[in-house]
Amino acid sequence: MAGRRPHRLGLALIALMAVAGRAGAQESGRDYLRAAANVDRFIEEGIRKRGVSASTLTDDFEFIRRAYLDAVGFTPGAEAVLAFARNNNPDKREQLVNMLVASPQYIERWAVVWTTMIVGRRNDRNSSGVNRATMKSWMKEALLRDKGWDHITREIIMDDGTNEEN
């Protein structure tokens, strides 16, 4: 089997399990601060192991652009950028992220991202028979219901029946 690429679904499921294992936030309800601290430690450990220095904080213009691109997949409009830059609230970055994560665009973007990771980019069915549209719809619903990654991963691995049923 030399030269064969690993199966995309298997890799995506491993990635989902890793995220579920690392985050652990949903097990204790909504302990976001603990989850954020765990992520920060993970990043700091990676930076330290690689012997690189952390980047400096970005200015407001770069922050809002990056936040929009990462969370919803597009850049903010000029009015949103100017309003953010003029906002003097010390919590404005946290508020921006919370607003983006609560938006329908966030759910749509991440349903597409995870579906692509799991089943690929083809529009119909991939080699394993998974229907992309069905998977995206299921993933969107899972994200809307705020299912934990442990539940999402378990459902992907454990469900039986046809792809359209699950």
Image (cartoon, rainbow, N blue to C red):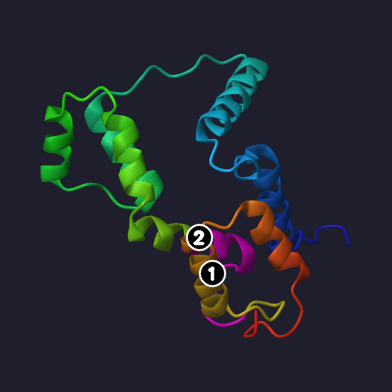
Query: Residue 98 placed where, x, y %?
Result: 35, 42
Residue in front for this viewpoint, 36 or 47: 36
Left/right of residue 139 with respect to residue 95 in the rendered view:
right
- Residue at 56 percent of width and 16 percent of height: 52
Query: Counting other residues with Cα less than 10 Å from the Cα at mark 1, is it few (<14), some (14-19), or many (20 or more)?
Result: some
**Residue at the spot of label 1:** 121
- The region drawn magenta spans 111-125
Q: Is residue 152 magenta?
A: no
Q: Is residue 120 magenta?
A: yes
Residue in front for this viewpoint, 124 or 57: 57
Amino acid under disc 1: Arg
- Residue at 26 percent of width and 30 percent of height: 92
Q: Main secondary structure of the magenta part?
A: helix
**Residue 40 visible in the displayed image:** yes
Query: Counting other residues with Cα less than 10 Å from the Cα at mark 2, is it few (<14), some (14-19), or many (20 or more)?
Result: some
Query: Of label 1 and label 2, which has the lower sequence position?
Result: 1
Point out the frontmost of discs 1 and 2. 2
Label 2: which secondary element: helix
Please say if 104 is above or below 19.
Answer: below
Please say if 16 is above or below 28.
Answer: below
Residue 110 circle label: none
> In which quadrant is the N terminus drawn?
bottom right
- Residue at 18 percent of width and 34 percent of height: 84
**Residue at the spot of label 2:** 143
> In which quadrant is the C terminus drawn?
bottom right
Residue 96 placement: quadrant: top left
